[in-house]
Image: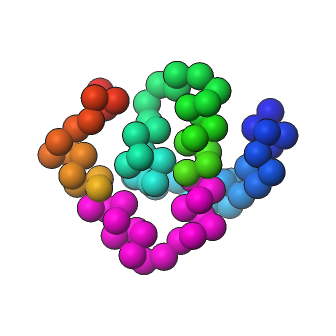
């Protein structure tokens, strides 16, 4: 279904999952609230893969630690 919706969806399967990611620090984690929420999660994952850099990894790491100290309302 998502491969039809998003042109480069299968790109996600090329990378092993990690502890955190761009989608998670942007708030797209946990239970999904509908197709739009899932789509935003997938777009963030693909954006990470297409724009990877060491600085982006540091941003994700920093935001992960920040969210650990100050959890957003979407965290449970």
- In the image, residue 34 sits, relative to residue 6, either above or below, namely above
Query: Residue 17's x, y, as percent?
Result: 52, 53
- In the image, residue 12 sits, relative to residue 28, either above or below, namely below
**Quick check: 28 left or right of 9?**
left
Furthest-top residue in view?
33
Image quadrant in which the N terminus is located? top right
SS majority, magenta: helix
Image quarter for residue 29?
top left
Rendered residue at 46%/54% (across/down): 22
- In the image, residue 34 sits, relative to residue 22, either above or below, namely above
Magenta stretch contains residue 52: yes
Rendered residue at 55%/42% (across/down): 41
Image quarter for residue 68?
top left
Query: Residue 2's x, y, as percent?
Result: 75, 38
Magenta stretch contains residue 42: no
Furthest-left residue in view?
69
Query: Residue 36's x, y, as percent?
Result: 61, 30
Rendered residue at 53%/71% (across/down): 52
**Quick check: 68 left or right of 13?**
left
Rendered residue at 71%/58% (across/down): 11
Question: How many numbered marks does the figure carry?
Answer: 0
- Residue range highlighted in magenta: 45-62
Furthest-bottom residue in view?
54
């Amino acid at each position: 279904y998502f491969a039809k919706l998003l042109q480069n969806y299968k790109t996600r399967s090329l990378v092993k999952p990690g502890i955190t990611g761009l989608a998670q620090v942007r708030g797209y984690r946990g239970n999904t609230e509908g197709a739009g929420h899932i789509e935003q999660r997938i777009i963030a994952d693909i954006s990470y893969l297409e724009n990877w850099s060491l600085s982006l990894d540091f941003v994700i790491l920093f935001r992960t630690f920040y969210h650990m100290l100050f959890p957003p309302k979407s965290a449970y």
